[in-house]
Image (tube, helix red, strand yellow):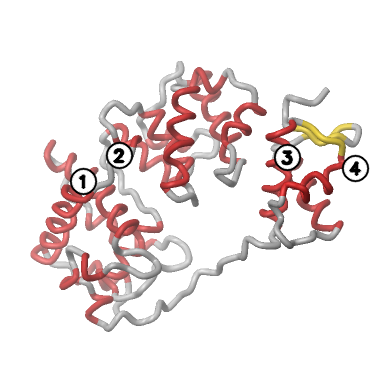
Amino acid sequence: MVSMSSATDQLNDTHLHQVRTRILDWYAQNARKLPWRQPDTTAWGVLVSEVMLQQTQVARVWEPWLAWMQRWPGPAELAAAEPADVLIMWGRLGYPRRALRLHETAKAVVEHHDGVLPADPEKLLALPGIGEYTAAAVSSFAFGIPEVVIDTNVRRVHARIFTGDGAAAPSLTAAERRLAATLMPETTTEHGVAQANTWNVATMELGALICTARAPKCQECPVLDQCAWVAAGKPEPTTVAKTQSWNGSDRQVRGAIMGVLRAQGAIDVVHLQATVEATGRLGRHVPEDTQWNRALNGLVADGLATLKHEVLALPGTEN
């Protein structure tokens, strides 16, 4: 196993060309036909997809994205919507703060960019809730600007092929950035720019479909014989990401409360616990009063609900 910095230093043109060519050829044959990848998808549609896909599987995003884009095809339409409608439309995608941030982004695009999503990654970064990854992804996938796009899948692919580690570091490192930039095709020509943008999505796709975190399909990998991790015997990762159980978590309780609010709009706090439990979304978990209060207060603090006169409501629906 080698460090990420050493992996970058040890790259040679022949190895790099083989890896790039095989992954790009594999992608050309195996790319999923996702709705947000269609040629007529707007830049705004790409942004919406990237926000929805954060920590959410593609299968769960497909239909909500189509419904969302039909209702609010551009930032102007979304900016004019009520926050409650936005949260209801978000449904059970999870992490509903993303919906409110997307709503805020739509308003910012209308107010500061004449309703047109900017292509410049720095301007994208200035929008509410848009981080480094999303800004780079939208610039590359929507506008053809060859930014280096690094997500969890990309980091895992790079770690396995070039360092021999089964997983990337817990957080993005400077060495990972350097390796990712080195792996990008040259962008001095129009063909190179197009190839660089395809390389971004191709590497992500390989990580999503083949080089998965669990049960990777190594025998189907186009760079099997180039993979340092396979050559090393697939050692266990040097770092293991911590995962929190959903059952019994504050997220589960918050999600159950939001489900009631999406269905009813508002509810007296005195009836909240019984109503939530009746939905069955808590399973066998019986939250203590402290967890109920923590979940409720957290939703209010995050702007996902309002609490007035002992009535909990979606924002904008309170009397």
Left or right: where does residue 266 sit relative to residue 15?
A: right
> Looking at the image, is mark 3 or mark 4 earlier in the sequence?
3
Q: Position of residue 219 (x, y in %)?
A: 21, 70
For disc 2, the neighbor class at 10 Å (few under 14, some 14 to 19, many from 20) is: many
> Looking at the image, is mark 4 or mark 1 earlier in the sequence?
1
Q: Position of residue 307 (x, y in %)?
A: 83, 36
> Looking at the image, is mark 2 or mark 1 earlier in the sequence?
2
Q: Are marks 4 and 1 in contact (CB under 8 Å)?
A: no
Left or right: where does residue 187 sit relative to residue 78?
A: left
Residue 196 marker: 1
Q: Which residue is mark 2?
A: 140
Mark 4 vs mark 1: in front: 4
Q: Amino acid at mark 2?
A: Ser
Relative to 307, residue 256 above or below: below
Q: Are marks 2 and 1 in contact (CB under 8 Å)?
A: yes
Residue at left offset 86%, top offset 32%: 308
> Looking at the image, is mark 4 or mark 2 earlier in the sequence?
2
Q: Position of residue 270 (x, y in %)?
A: 90, 42
Relative to 286, residue 41 above or below: above
The C terminus lies in quadrant: top right
SS under mark 1: helix
Residue at left offset 29%, top offset 57%: 180
Q: Which residue is mark 4?
A: 270
The span from disc 3 to disc 1 (Cα, nearest Å) is 45 Å
User: On the image, which quarter does residue 310 sit in?
Assistant: top right
**Residue 83 vs residue 119, the one in the foreground:** 83
The span from disc 2 to disc 1 (Cα, nearest Å) is 9 Å
The span from disc 4 to disc 1 (Cα, nearest Å) is 57 Å
Relative to 86, residue 31 above or below: below
Q: Position of residue 84 (x, y in %)?
A: 67, 28
Mark 4 vs mark 2: in front: 4
> Looking at the image, is mark 2 or mark 3 earlier in the sequence?
2
